[in-house]
Image: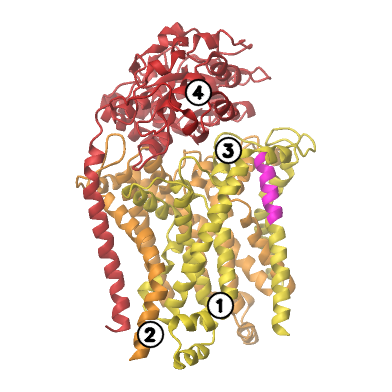
Chain colours: A orange, B yellow, C red
Amino acid sequence: MSRSRGRRLGAFVFLSPGLTYLLVLMLVPLVLVLGTSFFQRGRFGGVVYEFTTENFGRLVDPLYLGVLGDSVRIAVLTTLLALLIGYPTAYLIARLPRKWKTVALVAIVLPFWTNFIIRIYAWIMLLNGPGLVNSGLKLLGLGPYELLYNDGAIVVGLLYSYLPLMVLPLYAAIERLDPQLREASANLGASAFTTFRKVTLPLTVPGVLTGSLFVFVPSFGNFVIPEMLGGSKSIMVGNLIRNQFLKARDWPFGSTLALALIAVLVVLLVAQAWAARRG
Amino acid sequence: MGRGRLLYVPFWAAYAFLYLPIAVLVVMSFNSGDSAYTLDGFSLKWYGELAADERIRDGLVNTLIVATGSTAIATVLGTMLAVGLARHTRSKTLDAVALMPAVLPDLVLAIGLLVFYGVIQLTLGLYSVVLAHGLFAMAFVAAVVRTRLAGADTSLEEASRDLGAGPVATFMRITLPQLVPGIVAGALLAFTLSLDEFVIAYFTIGNSEQTLPIVIYSMIRFGVTPKINALAAILLLVSFTAVIAGQRLTRIGESRAQD
Amino acid sequence: MSRTRFTRRLPVAVTAAGLALAVAACGGESSTSSAGANPAAADELKPNADLSKQTLQVTVWDGYIPKELPQMVKEKLKVQDLKIALHETNEIAMTKLTAPGDSGIDVAFVSGQYAQALNEMGLLEPIHPELIPNLANLYPEATQLSYDKGNKYSVPYTWGTTGICYRTDLVKAKPTSWNDILKPAPWAEKKVTMMTTERWLALPALKALGYSVNTDKDDEIAKAKDLLMAQKPHLLTYDDTTFGDKLVAGESVMAEAWDGWCPTTDPKGNIGFVVPKEGSDLWVDTMVIMKSSKNKEAAHALINYILDPEVHSWAAANINYKVPNKAAMERVKIPKGSLLGVKPADLLDGEAIIDLGQASTKFSRLSEEVTAG
């Protein structure tokens, strides 16, 4: 009896400060965003508290659905490229000698420690018309190409920013693999590729899923990278949301767009959980 | 073995990809001209201009204030939350709620807070960013401390409780000392994340303050200046030193632990 | 109550509390947000107020006022402090100034039509001319601007027009029409930039079609949209802030630009500016005092100080912007290639942009649709 009371007291003492914080600064704001999406914008911005579902009607306008679709496409492409580069990288790091392993891992994370925006800015210098990539290509007698202000530039920026988030969980998953499994497979006469396909890959699926999620989520909701590298010519759903709040001053529609973003992510999370259970 | 060697192509490509822009930033920071594309000669003048830039200095101070404040909040609340979740409840829902700020896109948190601060008519300032950063940092601290808790020995805690100590006394004397490495790691993570956070700060900061990432963003918005390159080089140097120092410290810590 | 029940109930309680708070907040808000259609009445201000007790917060575009201004103002006016916040665009300034809660800003720099909108929302303090004797330095034309005749709630800081800024050495033909930028010739393909700020994005298209920049007719705005959508694939990018850098670097050859931001005085001397034959606008960037300011005497003193010919001429001499201050312009040496020599009377050929009330959202929508599409 006294122990269970102690437990309840403990739960209250330890959980209530943090949960109150979460309640006030996360859950209430999210409910407010949901609420705002059913109201109207005022003439000069602000919110007029009259119920409407107009914002959701606007959402299915092909214009906005198109941006939502583009955002999914860009984020998926980024994730696939990150997987394509990140998997072999993580695989090789996991097989390096211990000393080099640490160096290789630190080297993956280190660029992460300069400012996020400066890293994007470096890509402007690299990709623009008179930039370094075009200068390099010129030496080879190629170009100049339009490398900046398009979807490709956005993908490069996103990939650059979030590649480490793919490599780290993959490394963790591959590292945990028992090398004896691979050896057994090889001893049974399987080729390296078959071993990879039948043993390594299935066992690292959780790492693949986690890494993909880590890359997809920040890519999908990004507005800084599309703004800097897409030049408002190619935009993503994050730019739309940002613009509703900080340019067009249409908070209700901005809130509706944010809900759409959350909805896509929820669908994705459910799919991921389903895939993880099957895998 | 040829196929194995093929794997090294994406491996080295990944590192080249990660370091090419960094190399460009560092090299161009020593440019004597003010073009962003052509290297005219060697000069340290951009470092001088950087040191004289008040906006950058103010931004750095504000960033440190925000990071310190939010780390303090996040460390205390995150640790308590982790202990509460690990020891006092088995609720999966609460687990998920506690992790949510780390999983939600920053933009969603940012506009949620903007709407919320608007509804309660809060005048924005640095503290509104401290509160916002404290939120997601708390989730990271809680996650890191929980991993540590999962590995901790619970028998001591049980013994303490059996001997009649209350939950708070048990926590202070038994649990907390075991958690210190996890708490320090969590706090460091919180601090680093806050230092570089842009989106939430951009939406929730007052009109008269700017954090360093916001200063950098608006400088770039208004034109290319090689001062930014110098700043990048310095930040890189600082984090490189921090990483090496951190490595040394953990190695010393590990060897002590083994003694 | 068992432990599990305690924790299971929590999320329910959390959601309920959140909903309650949201509803309460929304209910309480409705009166404040729908109000404010009337300009505010003037406050009683004391001409001899003790400024050393007042602190000023100003929001302004980056680089638009002298860096030393805070120091100068503190010394000359003896105000306690002057803090500068920066905004990138008018829209961002509007977001700051119209957000619920006290913005904490005393003086804001915004373009004329936005000053008009702020005034209609009741957010501006009327200007007390007796506290700004330097208003006498303004050109007579600058006191009769259509968004605010008689400077009742705003004081002009700079003025100018919008046109095409171009590289004289890289264009195959000197631009003369908005169509040169809207339908770029093959040599200008993907070497043209446009501004996205709502009214200025529409301006080239509206003028090329022969419409008013202040149109609120849906069919005219729709035709402008078609033109802008057709232009989009031929643009390098949209750029409101660094189009000058892109021209200097040779990334672009033509840009829609405000005259002051077109770097015509670049040492290489290869940048020109032209007002297209279809006509353009007259824009004015103004200083306004917020109704919520608690330092209104100091705010007036600041504006008066800025209108001092020596201080005001800084903008013309250093950032190439024409100032509507006769006494200040007479002090300025006009460099070669500069557009500062344009006379006020010629400037007034441009159509002044005014706020369109509810119809202004049509331009927000246009800007959004063009950039999203």
Q: CA distance from mark 3 to mark 2?
A: 55 Å
Q: Name the amino acid type tagged 4.
A: Ala
Residue C186 within the magenta-colored segment of the rendering: no
- Residue B219 badge: 3
Q: Closer to us: mark 4 or mark 1? A: 1
Horizontal side, residue B30 vs residue B162: left or right: right
**Residues indicated by labels 3 and 2 sit on the same polypeptide chain:** no
| Mark 2 lies on residue | A6
- Residue C257 badge: 4
Which residue is depicted at the point 46% across and 17% down?
C161
Q: Can the viewer see residue A170 in this picture?
A: no
Which secondary structure class fits the magenta region best? helix
Pinpoint the chain carrying mark 1: B
**Residues indicated by labels 3 and 1 sit on the same polypeptide chain:** yes
The answer to whether the residues at label 3 and label 2 have Cβ atoms under 8 Å apart is no
| Mark 1 lies on residue | B179
Residue B231 within the magenta-colored segment of the rendering: yes
**Residues indicated by labels 1 and 2 sit on the same polypeptide chain:** no
**Residues indicated by labels 2 and 4 sit on the same polypeptide chain:** no
Tag 4, which secondary structure?
Answer: strand
Tag 3, which secondary structure?
Answer: helix
**Residues indicated by labels 4 and 1 sit on the same polypeptide chain:** no
Pinpoint the chain carrying mark 4: C
In the rendered image, the quadrant that contains the N terminus of chain A is bottom left
Q: Nearer the viewer, residue B104 or C236?
A: B104
